[in-house]
């Protein structure tokens, strides 16, 4: 029962790699957008807000298909990227990371935005009167105080990325060793005769990863809160 | 010298103030809602006037006619808020050092020691703001503003959140600050007694307008009028 086969290992490793890369790239972007939404008023803000949350409410297969249309080899952006920069998303693990990043983005941005909104603007004003330019106020006051929310967003995004299925399989298919993540491996195994035991193994693995991520986030959040309030 | 001649509409309320001050401590006196905080927020650059000018030592900080607005972080004007506003994630030492770091000033140990001694906060340096009493917090806030080496220090009812006992604990430090630090101050208060002890010049505000300007004597005139 607990003999994990090489194919399953590959799927586990691929899932971890895809989710890690997606989270690490989405985080700085997410922090920037969360800050814009929390602290700035600009034309088209409601539109950006809606676009970010769209993957949460659209059927994942729709998001995956839209990614295929834009980032596929003949897609508007995908074609240009592969011609000029040699970056290919279609049917590669990088495409899986892109799909996971897009799908988990709303879950990543929301806690960060809420925690930035919760930072007392009076402290930011105080920092300005002490000579801190806006970007230094952000780095020395806003971001450290919003850190628990950033960590929460990262863990939530990571967990979503690990579990992503619909958009990924639509965009980059289910190729063992390249785009077959835990979720799509489970899907394949369920459809294979005698695949039940292997599927169950992967189910246990994904439960383990999700639990570990939640425990880690709880620990981070507790430490960050202690550090911030100094008690 | 600080010169202010501004107008600002805030909801139904219009603030229109014009004064020039050369005093060491300019007391901004008035009841709550008279526009005192808005006026010093304009001096600090946190609030933009609808029209008018603000100059400090000949430098224009605001001039709406010429579209000049120097942002607060370039004004070198220190600000002590009623609610201290210490950074909760930094210890006292890091709070004190914040202004120097942001202004990229060289470290001046002697000055640091002078301020720490003046305010008696040497024993608090490794603590977090969450572990300080209200009076201690306010003393650290004075120190933090002073150590950014401002050209002018704004104090917005710095004793307002403290009880009588704490006020008496802090007042002597403020008198020392006035006499030893050599930085001109604008001191906002609705407490005439406090201003009599500290101010060298009074600007009296009532419902957004300046009603009196002059020495500390104007305070007694107003209290007689009211009595």
Image: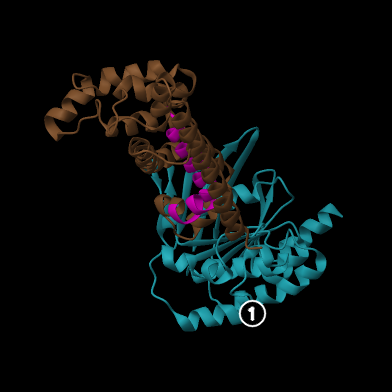
Chain colours: A brown, B cyan
Q: Foreground: A178 or B61?
A: A178
Label 1, secondary structure: give it.
helix
Query: Which residue corresponds to the image point at 63% horizontal and 77% vertical from the top-left?
Result: B121
The quarter of the rendered structure image containing the C terminus of chain B is: bottom right
Query: Which residue corresponds to the image point at 15% horizontal and 34% vertical from the top-left?
Result: A85
Residue B34 lies left or right of residue B5; in this view the side is: right
Query: Which residue corresponds to the image point at 63% horizontal and 58% vertical from the top-left?
Result: A229
* Above/below status of B73 relative to A35: below
* Above/below status of B170 relative to A10: below
Image location (x, y in percent) of residue A199: 46, 29
User: Which residue of the protein is positioned furthest toward the left in this rendering?
Assistant: A83
Residue A12: name its quadrant. Answer: top left
Based on the picture, tell me whether residue A145 belongs to the magenta stretch: yes
Based on the picture, tell me whether residue A70 belongs to the magenta stretch: no
- Give the residue number, with chain letter if any, for mark 1: B123
Q: Foreground: A109 or A71?
A: A71
Residue B193: name its quadrant. Answer: bottom right
- How many marks overall? 1
Q: Chain of mark 1?
A: B
* Above/below status of A109 relative to B194: above
Q: Is residue B18 visible?
A: no
Q: Main secondary structure of the magenta part?
A: helix
Residue A19 lies left or right of residue A117; in this view the side is: left
Segment colored magenta: A139-164
Q: Foreground: B155 or A74?
A: A74
């Amino acid at each position: 029962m607990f003999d994990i086969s090489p194919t399953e290992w590959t799927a586990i490793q691929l899932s971890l790699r895809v989710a890690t890369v997606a989270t690490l790239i989405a985080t700085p972007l997410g922090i920037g957008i969360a800050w814009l939404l929390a602290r700035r008023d600009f034309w088209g803000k409601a539109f950006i807000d809606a676009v970010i949350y769209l993957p949460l409410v659209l059927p994942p297969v729709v998001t995956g298909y839209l990614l295929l249309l834009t980032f596929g080899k003949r897609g508007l952006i995908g074609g240009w990227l592969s011609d000029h920069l040699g970056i290919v998303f279609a049917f590669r693990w990088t495409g899986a990371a892109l799909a996971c990043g897009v799908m988990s983005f709303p879950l990543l941005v929301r806690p960060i935005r809420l925690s930035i909104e919760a930072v007392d603007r009076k402290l930011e004003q105080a920092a300005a009167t002490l000579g801190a330019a806006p970007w230094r106020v952000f780095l020395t006051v806003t971001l450290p105080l919003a850190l628990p929310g950033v960590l929460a967003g990262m863990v939530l995004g990571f967990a979503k990325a690990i579990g992503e299925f619909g958009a990924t399989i639509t965009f980059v298919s289910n190729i063992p060793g390249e785009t077959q993540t835990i979720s799509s491996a489970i899907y394949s195994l369920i459809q294979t005769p005698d695949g039940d035991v292997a599927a169950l193994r992967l189910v246990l693995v994904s439960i383990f990863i999700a639990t570990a991520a939640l425990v880690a986030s709880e620990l981070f959040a507790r430490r960050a809160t202690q550090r911030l309030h100094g008690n | 010298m600080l010169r202010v001649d501004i107008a600002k509409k805030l909801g139904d309320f219009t603030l229109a103030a014009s004064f020039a001050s050369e005093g060491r401590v300019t007391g901004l006196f008035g009841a709550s809602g008279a526009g005192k905080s808005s006026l010093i927020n304009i001096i600090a650059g946190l609030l933009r006037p609808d029209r008018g000018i603000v100059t400090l030592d000949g430098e224009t900080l605001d001039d709406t006619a010429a579209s000049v607005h120097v942002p607060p972080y370039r004004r070198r004007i220190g600000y002590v808020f009623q609610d201290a506003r210490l950074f909760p994630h930094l210890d006292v030492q890091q709070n004190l050092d914040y202004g120097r770091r942001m202004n990229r000033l060289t470290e001046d140990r002697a000055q640091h020691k002078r301020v720490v001694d003046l305010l008696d906060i040497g024993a608090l340096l490794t603590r977090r703001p969450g572990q300080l009493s209200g009076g201690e917090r306010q003393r650290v806030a004075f120190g933090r503003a002073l150590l950014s080496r401002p050209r002018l220090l704004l104090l917005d009812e710095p004793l307002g959140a403290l009880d009588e006992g704490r006020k008496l604990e802090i007042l002597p430090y403020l008198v020392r600050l006035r006499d030893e630090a050599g930085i001109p101050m604008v001191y906002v208060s609705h407490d005439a007694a406090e201003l009599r002890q500290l101010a060298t010049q009074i600007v009296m505000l009532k419902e957004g307008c300046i009603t009196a300007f002059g020495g500390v004597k104007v305070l007694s005139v107003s209290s007689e009028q009211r009595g």
